[in-house]
Amino acid sequence: MKTIKPISRIILAIGSLSMLAAYFVPLWRILLWAPQYPEGLEMKIFIDTLGGDVKIISALNHYIGMRHIEVSMFPEFSYMIYIVGGMIATGLLTALWGKRFMLVSYFLLIIAVGMAALLDFYLWGYDYGHNLDPSAAIKIEGMTYQPPLIGTKELLNFTAFSGPDVGGWVFIAVGLAIGGVLIYELMSNKK
């Protein structure tokens, strides 16, 4: 079994520990702008709760038949702390043991968790934006209100943006750093 270099192990440890930020800062955010809300409305998604203007957004969404946004509609909040904790522990074990197969496995784990999180968010958004109350005050035939997965989208008179917040950017940076370490290890072994 090939061993990774000390600098790679240090980067792994620092990257893994930096994911502790996920317990304190928001991971994702959704922003909404409209003529009646020029300052915008914001919903922040943390590892185990929601923050920002959730009550206002939820009340507005109710007029078009969307369900009220509540923490209880996200079962992920009950186990995300353990998934992130497992990722941190796996990264630290990889740095400690220093085997290349573990580095590859850790990088694949980061990619898999990131893709699963995006898929989960997409499926929630699809359900939330398509399963509307037929007795809603405002109905537009054929209109759905799925928030964007990443980027900007026009929804009636609102412009909606969805993207990573501080914690999400930390995960992206860690994934890129671990990918860079993996490339470095593979390239240095060819020499």
Image (cartoon, rainbow, N blue to C red):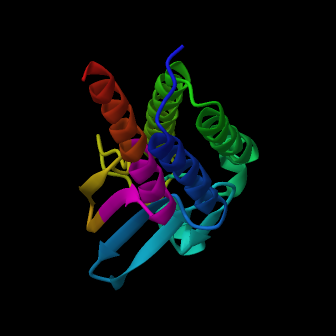
Q: Position of residue 97 (x, y in %)?
A: 64, 30
Q: Which residues are magenta?
A: 160-175
Q: Position of residue 163 (x, y in %)?
A: 37, 57
The answer to if 161 sits in the magenta stretch is yes
Residue 132 in view (yes/no): no
In the foreground, 80 or 29: 80
Q: In the image, what residue occupies the spot 69% across and 48% down?
A: 77
Q: In the image, what residue occupies the spot 32% across and 35% down?
A: 184
Q: Position of residue 105 (x, y in %)?
A: 52, 23
Farthest top residue?
1
Q: In the image, what residue occupies the spot 29% across and 40% down?
A: 142
The answer to if 113 sits in the magenta stretch is no
- Location of residue 64 with respect to 181 vertically, above or below: below
Q: In the image, what residue occupies the spot 49% across and 23% down?
A: 100
Residue 7 in view (yes/no): yes
- Location of residue 137 with respect to 34 vertically, above or below: above
